[in-house]
Image: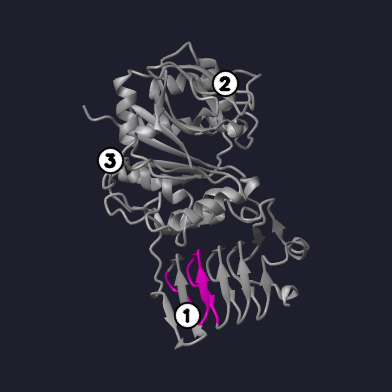
Amino acid sequence: MRIRVLGIVLAGGKGTRLHPLTRERAKPAVPFGGKYRIIDFVLSNFINSGIYSVYVLTQFRSQSLLQHLSEGWQFGSLLKTQFVIPVPAQMRSAGETWYQGTADAIFQNINLVEQSDPHVVAIFGGDHIYRMNITNMIEYHVQKSAEVTVAAIPVHRKQAHEFGVIEASDDGHILGFHEKNPEAPTMPGDSDRVYASMGNYIFSTRTLLRLLHDDAADENSSHDFGRDILPRLAGKSSMYAYDFQTNRIPGEPLDAAPYWRDVGTIDSYYDANMDLRFVAPALNLYNRQWPVRTTSYPDPPAKFTFDEENRRGQAIDTIVSGGCILSGGMVRNSVLGRGVRVHSGAVVEDCVILDNCDIGRRAKVRRAILDKNVRVPEDAAIGWDLDRDRLHHHVTESGIVVVGGNRTGVDITDLVV
């Protein structure tokens, strides 16, 4: 029997820790890796896994996300079982409120589950960078005759306050679930790591509907899977942890380690972008058997100009997206989004530069993230004097400078040296 799967992506979070990149956009709509958006990774995982019925639940600052989905993820299929459909908050609760938690988000759209009548529902977050063969997780769910399956991965115990932490038996049965508890128990035999929930769940449909109705009737619940539903089920129900480390992607070597990054902070977002620069990156964007899909932009090819000494457009260990022109500038160890211009004498090092930025002549930028449409004027310097940068921009504790942008462009003339 072929199992009917309904995919639901939770894409409504504020993403406050990624500010200022989330000042005007939802976290899943934040650009990543030159040409993608964060949400492209979970949607690509669904499509590559053969799951074509996907609802995307949106909420905060959703316009950029809705636009991206309409441009890149509308199949136009005649088949009702093939769709990626954004669902804005419907306010179906009794008080007509925004989503109160992850479980409430599903409950307010429970009609979509009932109408689809799937065997299982795959509820995934829309704000992580990873590749996952979801079919493997569903097969595990069926093999265990599970009611609920939670994808899990070891992380350092210092990160326990950021995740739901799982206690599991040797066969994967979940015995305890501790949501964002810095004192959560570590893994048996490994005092440095905890077994963290990835926020990706497989529910048998009948179980999901029952749990959602019970939770909605509980006035003391915060209506969240991690804080309420999963802790109550631990040790009492057929709930299992799926070890993400066993996941295998077609087209990848059998010994390749699965890649997953929580890009919830500026530093982790920056590090994940930097992961792409290596000769053999941990996140392989060039696997044609498991492509990362996104909007198809009508960009011209990238161009490097001026073959002259001290005026040669060059990029080393760098991702360069379509429409970029490097006219005599040097870029090292960076990720350039679409349509970036780097002019003569400019130097860009260890940076993430989003779409349509313009780096003026002789400007110097290092260890920085430039949001869309930022214009760095001639002779400006960013990332060289952090005390000065803090007067105008957000600077992380590790020294990454984030220059905010807007739709019309930002000219940071106050940084000319």
Q: Is residue 24 above or below residue 256?
A: below
Q: What is the three-letter code of the residue carrying label 1? A: Gly
Where residue 159 sits in the image (x, y, percent)? 59, 34
| Quadrant where the N terminus is found in the figure | top left
Task: Evaluate whether residue 333 shows in this view.
Answer: yes
Judge from the rendering whether residue 93 lies leftward or rightward of residue 204; answer left or right: right
Residue wearing tag 3:
254
What span is colored magenta in the figure? 322-343
Q: Determine which quarter of the picture holds residue 48.
A: top left
| Residue 313 disc label | 1
Tag shown at residue 185: 2
Taking the spot 58% from the left edge, 65% from the top edge, the residue there is 372
| Rendered position, 150 above or below 130 | above
Crowding at mark 3 (Cα within 10 Å: few <14, some 14-19, many 20+): few
Q: Would residue 148 appear left or right of 383 to someone viewing this image?
A: left
- Badge 3 element: loop
Is-magenta flag for residue 325? yes
Q: Report helix, strand or loop for mark 1.
A: loop
**Which kind of residue does numbered mark 3 sit on?**
Leu
Residue at 75% from the left image edge and 64% from the top image edge: 392
Q: Residue 171 in the image: x percent, y percent?
A: 37, 17
Q: Earlier in the sequence, mark 3 or mark 1?
A: 3
Residue 107 vs residue 235, the one in the foreground: 235
**Quarter of the image that includes the C terminus:** bottom right
